[in-house]
Amino acid sequence: MRGLSAAAAVVAAFAAPCGALAAQPQSRPQLVTNEAAIVEAMRPAAFDIKDPMAVLAYVLESLPPRVTVYPTENYYYFKFVHSGVPIAGNLRLDPRDRDKGKVYFGYYEDNADWKREGLEQGLELDGSHSVLVERVDNLLYRISYRGTSVLFALNDVSQVKPPAGAVGPDERLIGPVFDESAVRFFLVYNAKAKVFHYILDEAADVPDGLEPSRRADGLLIGKRTGFAYYRDARLDRKILIGVFEQNVRLNNYFDGPFDQLPDNFLEGETLRQAIVDSDPEVKGKIDRLGYFHDGESRYAISPYMQYRSENDLLQVHRCATDRRVPAAAYYRCFVMDEAGPRTVGRPLALRGLRGKSR
C-alpha cells in the first residue's frame, strides 16, 4: 500500500507505540456490528469529498491528540464512508522532506473487483497550504491545520533485533519491518544467492493464525492475512514466500511488506548496495533509499509469490526438496522469477533444471 493507492486501516487504527504492544493488558476484542456499518453508509455527507483540504480537516479533527504511525515507511492509513462510497487514504511523513515541513496526503475511492477506479486525490502539503509540519522530537511530528493539531509518533524499531541464528552466515540484515498488516519481519539480503528475504519476526506473538498445509511439510498460511511462509530447513525461522494475489490487486493492507521498508533506520548505503548487488542494471539509477532519480518510483523488493491458490505454493516446497537443486541455490527456491498474466512465476532455483532427472 504505497502512495495514493494505499488501502487502509480505520482512522484510529495503530494508536499505541510498538514497544507497548506486548505489555498491553489482555482485553476483549472490539465488536464490529452491521448496525454500525449501516449507520455509516446512511450518514449524509458533511463536506465536499473533492476538496482535499476539507478532507484533511475532517481527518485531523477525527483523530485523537496523539497517534502512532506503525508502518515503517511512515504511512498513517485511514478509511471512511462518504455518501455511501468507501474512501481510503493516508498521510505520509517521508524522511526525505518531513523536516522541511512537508507531508504527503492522499485519498481515493477504495478498490473493489466489481468497479472501475474512481475519485483519487493526492497533494504534497506544507506552509503554502496553511499546513504546519513540525519536528517535535526524534520520530515525533506535529501536523496542524485550521486550529487542529495532532502528534504523529513514528514507530521506533531501532532496538528490534533478530534472534541469534535467524540471520544466515551469507546474509546481512537490512532492517526490521513493521507491515500495515501488523505482521513484523526482518528484511535480509543473501549476498551469496543474491536474493532478499522477509523473515517472520516471532519475538512477540504473531497476530495471525498460521495454518500448516496438509500438502507440504513446512508450508504455513495465515488465516487473517493470507501470508504464506516456508519453514527454513537450515535455520530456525520462517521465510515469507507468498501473498494472496487478490490482495495485491486490490492494494489492501495484506498486499505484502514491499512497501514498508525501515526508512528511518537504514544505515548508510546498506540498502542501495544490496539492491545493486542483486540487480546491477540499476547501478547509478537509485538513491540510498532505493528511489529512482526521477523521485517518483522506488525499487520494489518483493521476492515472494503472488499466489492464487495453495497449489501455486507447492512449487516452493518441491524446489526446496528437489535433489537437483544445488545446495548453494537452496535460498533461491524462496524467490520468484517474473510472473505473467497467466502465471504466478516459479522459484529462481528451478531455472535450467528442466530435463534433469530427480
Image: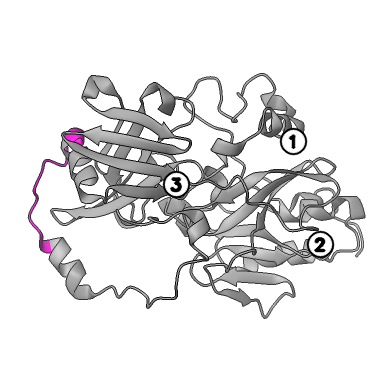
Query: Residue flagged by tag 3: what amino acid is it?
Result: Met
Q: Upstream in the sequence, badge 1 or badge 2?
A: 2
The span shown in magenta is 42-53
Q: Residues within 10 Å of mark 2 (few under 14, many from 20)?
A: few
Q: Upstream in the sequence, badge 3 or badge 2?
A: 3
Q: Which residue is mark 1?
A: 278
Q: Secondary structure at mark 3?
A: loop
Q: Which residue is mark 3?
A: 1
Q: Residues within 10 Å of mark 3 (few under 14, many from 20)?
A: many
Residue plotted at (55% across, 62% down): 308
**Residue 245 vertical position relative to residue 283 in the rendered view, above or below:** below
Query: Residue flagged by tag 2: what amino acid is it?
Result: Leu
Lateral position of residue 134 relative to residue 130, left or right: right
**Residue 304 vertical position relative to residue 195 in the rendered view, above or below:** below
Q: CA distance from mark 3 to mark 1?
A: 24 Å
In the picture, the disc for residue 235 is 2
Observer-side mark, 3 or 2, equals: 2
Q: Residue furthest front?
A: 137
Observer-side mark, 1 or 2, equals: 2
